[in-house]
Image: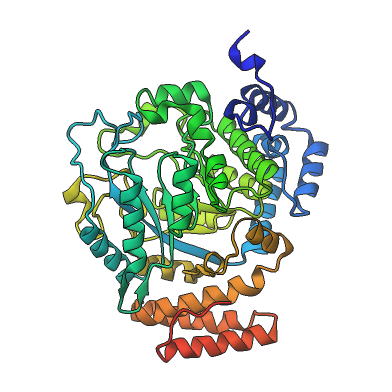
Amino acid sequence: MTAHDTVPYNPKSSKAEEFINHQEVLATLEYAAENKNNVELIDEILKKAATHKGLSHREAAVLLECDIEEKNQEIFALAKKIKEDFYGNRIVLFAPLYLSNYCINSCVYCPYHITNKHIPRKKLTQEEIKNEVIALQDMGHKRLALEMGEDPKNNSIEYLLESIDTIYSIKHKNGAIRRVNVNIAATTVENYKRLKDAGIGTYILFQETYHKESYERLHPRGPKHDYAYHTEAMDRAMLGGIDDVGLGVLFGLELYKYEFAALLMHAEHLEAVFGVGPHTISVPRIRRADDIDPSTFDNGIDDDTFAKIVACIRIAVPYTGMIVSTRESKKTRERVLELGISQISGGSRTSVGGYIHPEEDEGTEQFDVSDRRPLDEVVRWLMERGFIPSFCTACYREGRTGDRFMSLCKSGQILNCCHPNALMTLKEYLTDYASDLTREVGDRLIEEELKRIPNEKVRGIAEKYIKNIENGQRDFRF
């Protein structure tokens, strides 16, 4: 008997090995394999999912395992419908900002690992941060995700807090960063309180893998080696007052079916304990970078499997935002946008100082970017595919976070403000930053989308605000 066998499954527990229970994951995978061709059960699960109330990790695992082509097409169609019902045709845009690649961990899949002696190490000064932010503002971005390695000496919480203050203080022409999300290593409740007080949006932390033995092998040294401390970080973040947290795994490190079930168990745990699940779920796949060769990891997933994972997550947690980054190609992103993705990065640089200095000269990329198109091209591409590129940060700034956001989302009321807010922020982008061709495509799209606002009063206010934006005013929101 192993230690795993003696640990009970308890989604309300504060202990990682109880709410991400190894035996429960294995039992779930066995249940899914046994029922992958059980048409009656699959139909029951799809019928439940169609009520937009979500699925349990076991139910979702059955859909992921299903290999009946007709049912898989129903899964994809339902995922698309749920995405449209909750998020409409809006796609939120953001960019990562790398502050420092100093790190004391030894993660074997990341080039920032401490044993990498040839990668140039760099940490931005506040003046350099200002220059990076101005470059991002000049692209049109309003929402950033801060990234840095774990290094108490070089990347202290004080440095991060000062950097957040710097970012929010910069007003350049019509540019302003209105929401700063933070993706940093697991920390204390006290530090999460300080991040909350600094005005961050979402706290993001990828689990990398939920399989404890694999996790410890992939993180051989450094504070990140502590599986429980890392896995329980979201509980501490919420106890620290952060309403919105973002989950994610790095697909390719461990068997994807295991990660899928455990990821949903983590979402269920947050719902059970705090009454609100994750604000976002990210689905990165491992990519080449500096001394990292993804072919050395034997759990990679193909594009078809990736698309089905996205669809099944969307069905299982219909209210949760889903993120795909520039790790994925234009072709792949095009496919999964239809199946559940609601946020993407655009014009991204994954190196420290990469917006001012070309990445290839710096050599500090965390991973290779597959979609290298500039933001203007990404915006136009989205619009030509019928999506509304949104730079909206209104919910965060109006206090619609955590359970307040989820209650609005679950009732469908969020559509009354998100749609016009997206159009107004798009109009800001078109007026201040877009190329002539993108502006032409965008103005036509806004004209058509305004007609789709069902509430006549809201539509009239949105039309007025958009006219005010044309006349030089900024930052309207419902």
Residue 433 appears left or right of 463: left
At x 69% / y 40%, what residue is drawn? 60
Quadrant of the rendering where the C terminus is positioned:
bottom right
At x 50% / y 69%, what residue is drawn? 392
Rendered position, 398 above or below 309: below
At x 59% / y 60%, what residue is drawn? 401
Residue 401 appears left or right of 381: right
Residue 260's image quarter?
top right
Q: Is residue 332 visible?
A: no
Q: Is residue 361 visible?
A: yes
Q: Residue furthest front?
A: 190
Quadrant of the rendering where the N terminus is positioned:
top right
Q: Nearer the viewer, residue 379 or 226?
A: 226
Q: Position of residue 42 (x, y in %)?
A: 77, 40
Q: Position of residue 182 (x, y in %)?
A: 42, 51
Residue 153's image quarter?
top left
Q: Nearer the viewer, residue 92 or 337?
A: 92
Total count of labels: 0
Q: Position of residue 286 (x, y in %)?
A: 40, 38
Residue 372's image quarter?
bottom left
At x 36% / y 46%, what residue is drawn? 157
Residue 7 appears left or right of 122: right
**Coloured how?**
rainbow
Q: Position of residue 252 (x, y in %)?
A: 46, 33
Rendered position, 347 above or below 110: below
Q: Nearer the viewer, residue 97 or 56?
A: 97
Residue 455 appears left or right of 181: right
